[in-house]
Amino acid sequence: MTLNNIINWLDTLIWETSLASMHRWQAWLIQMLRILIATARDIREGLPTLRAMGLVYTTLLSLVPLLAVSFSVLKGFGVHNQIEPMLLGLLEPLGKQGVEITNKIIGFVDNVNVRVLGSLSLVFLFYTVISLLTKIEQALNNTWRIREYRGLIQRITEYISVIMVGPVLIFTGIGLATTIQTSTVASALESMHGYGTLIWMASTLMSFLLIVGAITFIYILVPNERVKFRSAFTGAVVAALLWKLTGWVFTSFVAGSAKYSAIYSGFAVAIIFMIWLYLSWLILLVGASVAFYHQHPERTSSRQQVLRLSARLREKIGLLLMLRVGQSFHNDSEKLTRKQLSRNLDIAAEALALVIRPLEEHGLLTESCDRKRVYLPGRSLEHIRIRDIWDAVRSAQESIHLNPDNVASDTSVDELLQSINTSIDSTLDDMTLLDLVEGSNAQTTARPLQIQS
């Protein structure tokens, strides 16, 4: 059997085998392989790495203000002394450089006195913190293929919740783990034969679970999407395992290397710190990608990644989309969300958004403001002409400065296009969306609409 045959066999096994025909453990294994392959495909395309680089830059600007704000909050709960152990734990893979960086950061934080800051400086302090959280939200939203962002007021209130609640939970948990390790009972057990290993395993497991819990909290709260706990937890476990493994590799081959000190001299500590920040953010985004594909297993296929639509495909999707929305409205059946439309038409949500946007801009489609955001016709069905739908999707992404009228043309080409448009007008005549819906309902052989939640 040649290598190509083996690759084709694996490709068929992973992507073309029905999971319903497998045992539960086999289906779980194949699904996890699909998720990991899809995540690796995202990394290969380079977007997670670019976002991680952007987060490193923002983190360097915002780290001290973020810790200063968190320090002020934690001081009210009496757990502010846990900032230094937390930083030491996060920077542990950097070895001696981690201790040096921690001492410098704590020194900067101690020098930030919120009481003596002017109003402008205080505003800048919170702005840098909000900008970091905004960058994190944008990165996770992009990972979740979300194009709609929270409103300014909602964003600020939820960011304040993250700043107020997140550090308290994390640092309290770290303080609890430290208390267990240094308690009298733990010390007594460590002195007994065999129990020292048990205490070490328990503290390591608790540290791992705290990391998983913190990342799960981020995955659920930050993206502008209703993330299921199971998916967020799965992504957090993968991210925590990668973080531990990467930390071990980093400690062994990077932080302990004398080459960086020889090459970068006094900048070695800063360079190593930035490399570790980059790897940490990349791991967080990889875990988010795993969580996304776990919640949307249908998106693991390469077919669902297409974001460029031909003119013919736009036209067909636009007509089908308006037909489905018109049917649900005309028949007074369950109204459709974007996810339901995506599954019903078997089209990626991002590709569907490329068609929805021009339809909304032309007033042919509208989204409700309810908690369950569903789509409705922009006006009565008899007042929506098929030609209007056709023109809306064909003219998508045109602008004032870039449209057919602004292109240097020739009389023969203009006459040909005019002839084509006249033919389309004569074919569509005054046909409306109502005519299309009633014609579809009249076809007894048509496939019934299937609503998927």
Image (cartoon, rainbow, N blue to C red):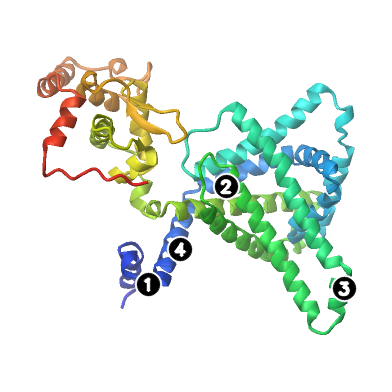
Whether label 1 touches label 3, CB < 8 Å: no
Q: Is residue 8 above or below residue 264?
A: below
Residue density around tag 3, few if under 14, some if 14–19, many if 20 or more, within 10 Å: some
Q: Which mark is residue 220?
A: 2
Please state which of the two labelled residues, at mark 2 or mark 4, is closer to the viewer. Answer: 2
- Looking at the image, tell me whether mark 4 or mark 3 is earlier in sequence order: 4
- What residue is shown with label 4? 32
Q: Amino acid at mark 1?
A: His
Q: Is residue 120 left or right of residue 216?
A: right
Seen at 86% across and 72% down, the residue is: 185
- Residue 76 percent coordinates (x, y): 84, 41
The secondary structure type at the circle numbered 4 is helix
Q: Circles 1 and 4: CB distance less than 8 Å?
A: no
Q: CA distance from mark 1 to mark 3?
A: 47 Å
Asked which quadrant contains residue 425, the reply is top left
Q: Residue furthest front?
A: 332
Pick whichever, 239 or 395, lies toward us. Answer: 239
Left or right: 54 with respect to 73? left
